[in-house]
Image (cartoon, grey):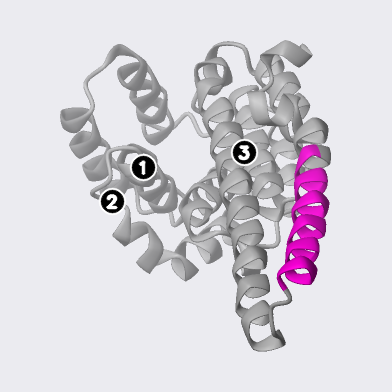
Amino acid sequence: MEKNLLPPLERHKRLIRVGGYCVSIAGSVLLATAFGRLGLPLPVQLPLLALWLLCLAGAALCVNAAWFRQLAKAVDALGPLQATAPDAYIEQLNALLQGQKNRTLQDIRLVNLGSAYAAKKDYRSAKQALEQVDASRLNPALRCPYYMNLSMTLFFLQETDAMLSVMDAQKALFDEYRADERTAQTIALLDIFAAVARRDIATAETLLRQSRRRWTDSESAAFYDSIERILAGNSGEKPE
């Protein structure tokens, strides 16, 4: 990714950091000088010093929050590439986030890499990316996307026992997100795949019919057609 395409705060991160240090040092020197010239007693100095340090910490937190929001927004803007040009998506995602020390940003990178590799049908690379995430410390906002991606990846790798284990363990999480339009269709697909993995074809067919009625766009219809062919007996075929 070209440098001028990076978010402003990321592009000028070093300059902002140096500026912050200069302001901190200059302000502290001025404050100390004022204390000396005014002859303020220690009980007065301490609250003023605490207030100055609090202002510095608050400013740093605000800048950091704005920087995080800009990076997250930049990642969201790459979203359309994930389905249409996954290689470009992977390249630009890594340019944005690879090397970032923030744990949540690295988890965002890995979870989205898993999705992009799955879009390429490179499920082994998807699994390798997802395996680098420590699920025990995952940001709550990433938990559902992470476990959806992991379950889907395991299904396509035909690791159905592992997939069912993940889905059973995360049942409460998936139930919580069933009403969310951003995740509802994927969770519904996982329910179908879980039924297939359990060889409960009747349930899988029922769930498939329900999904067809709810999501009627052409892309979903084509995907459901491929699942239907599997359920009809073409066990060697995978959804496209």
User: Any mark on residue 183, and which?
Assistant: 1
Q: Is residue 151 visible?
A: yes
Q: Is residue 126 magenta?
A: no
- Which residue position is annotated with label 2? 178
Categorize mark 3 by other alpha carbons within 10 Å: few (<14), some (14-19), many (20+). Answer: some
State the residue at coordinates (60%, 78%): 47
Vertical placement of residue 164 versus 113, above or below: below
Look at the numbered disc 1 and give the secondary structure of its residue: loop
- The residues bearing labels 3 and 1 have C-alpha atoms spaced at a distance of 27 Å
Could you say whether the residue bearing mark 3 is in a helix, strand or loop?
Answer: helix
Q: Amino acid at mark 3?
A: Trp
Whole-percent x and y of residue 154? 61, 48
Please state the horizontal and vertical placement of residue 164, each as a whole percent of the image.
51, 60
Residue located beneath label 3 in the image: 67
Which residue is depicted at the point 77% across and 25% down?
A: 95
**Magenta stretch in the rendered image:** 19-38
The location of residue 161, given as percent across then percent down, is 59, 60
Give how far across and how far down residue 19 sits, in percent. Answer: 78, 38
Amino acid bearing label 2: Arg
- In space, the residues marked 3 and 2 are separated at their CA atoms by 31 Å
- Earlier residue among tags 3 and 2: 3
Label 1 packing within 10 angstroms: few (<14), some (14-19), many (20+): some
Q: Disc 1 marks which amino acid?
A: Thr
Towards the viewer: 231 or 71: 71
Q: Can you name the residue that lies furthest to the bottom here?
A: 43
Circles 2, 1 touching at the beta carbon (< 8 Å): yes
Which residue is at the far left?
Answer: 213
